[in-house]
Every structure is written in C-alpha cells, then in structure tokens.
Amino acid sequence: MQNIFLKEDCDEFISRINKLTPNTQPLWGKMSVDQMLAHCNVTYEMVYDNIHEKPNGFMRFLLKSFVKKKVVDESFYPKNIRTAPQFIINGDRNFQLEKVRLISYINKTLELGKDNFEGKESLSFGKLSSNEWNNMFAKHLDHHLCQFGV
C-alpha cells in the first residue's frame, strides 16, 4: 500500500494523474476520465470542504458496521465495485479543473501530515487512525488510476 503521507508516493500519484488526458478511456467501468477525477475529489471534499452532509445516525451505523472495514483495510477494490450515492458523478466535468483540484488535495494532505489525521473523524466512519486514512485515500486513488491505465 502506498503512503499518502510520504512525498515520494504522492509524487508518484501526481505523476500518474499527469499522464491522463481528456481523451483517456477507462479499462473498465462507466465513468469518463473527467468524472473519475471529480469522483476522486469527493473523498477529499468530505475532509476539507463543508459541502457534503454527514449521514444520519442509522446510516453511519450501517456504514461503520458493514462498509468501513473494506474501505480502510489494505485489500484492494475489485473492478466495477458499486459506489456510494454521494460519489456518483453525472454529466461532464472540467477535466483540467478536476485534475488541478485532485493534485491540490493530495499536496494538502501531504503537507498536513500523518499526525493531523490520527483520530480525525470521517463523515461516514467516525474516528479513523492515520493508517486507515492512508489506506482509504491511497487505495481509492490507485484503483481509479489503474482503471484508466496509469
């Protein structure tokens, strides 16, 4: 598992993102490359931007009980896995804007560092360790960059 809190690993993610073009086609799935970038940005929006609602208590219970482990462990996501509704991106997005946003979020996470994420609360899963935050960020990015062949 790559480490989103190490510069070398962030540089590798950014290098892979920079290989994408507006015409890059997925190897699987339905998203276009601009939608994928916007989709990846949602994870960071939930941390840094106050634009997504916190799930209600019952939904948080379900997410923590049945989804959290798969999201924060070190196992990789299978192809064509279903996504949560707030991560579904419809319509066209501005490729360049979404790309710049994603790189900025990666850099911000690196700058804040591992200690900033230790015990930080996730909207969906409650408090997570910095290792769980890393796994969530890194495997999601890797999954979608592999989806687009980079």
Image: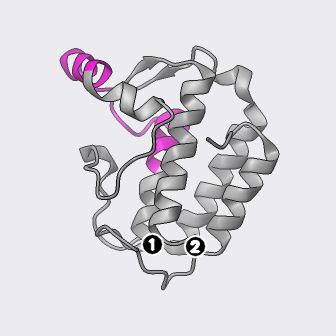
Residue 76, x across and y down, in percent = 45, 44
Q: Amino acid at mark 2?
A: Gln
Image quadrant in which you'd find residue 55: top left
Q: Is residue 141 left or right of residue 19?
A: left
Q: Which residues are magenta?
A: 42-65
Secondary element type, mark 1: helix
Give the residue at x 24% y 15%: 57
Which is more toward the observer, 116 or 149? 149
Is residue 124 at least partly visible in the picture?
no
- Name the dominant secondary structure of the magenta segment: helix
On screen, residue 125 above or below 3: above
Residue named by callout 1 = 33
Give the residue at x 64% y 75%: 19
Give the residue at x 53% y 64%: 98
Asked whether disc 2 touches disc 1, contact meaning CB atoms under 8 Å apart, the reply is: no
- For disc 2, the neighbor class at 10 Å (few under 14, some 14 to 19, many from 20) is few
Which of the labelled discs sits on residue 96, or is there none? 2
Give the residue at x 34% y 70%: 28
Secondary element type, mark 2: helix
Residue 116, x across and y down, in percent = 69, 22
Image quadrant in which you'd find residue 130: top right
Mark 2 or mark 1, which has the lower sequence index?
A: 1
Q: Amino acid at mark 1?
A: Val
Is residue 109 at least partly visible in the picture?
yes
Q: Nearer the viewer, mark 2 or mark 1?
A: 1
Quadrant in the picture for the N terminus: top right
Residue with the most extreme bottom position: 23
On screen, residue 30 above or below 72: below
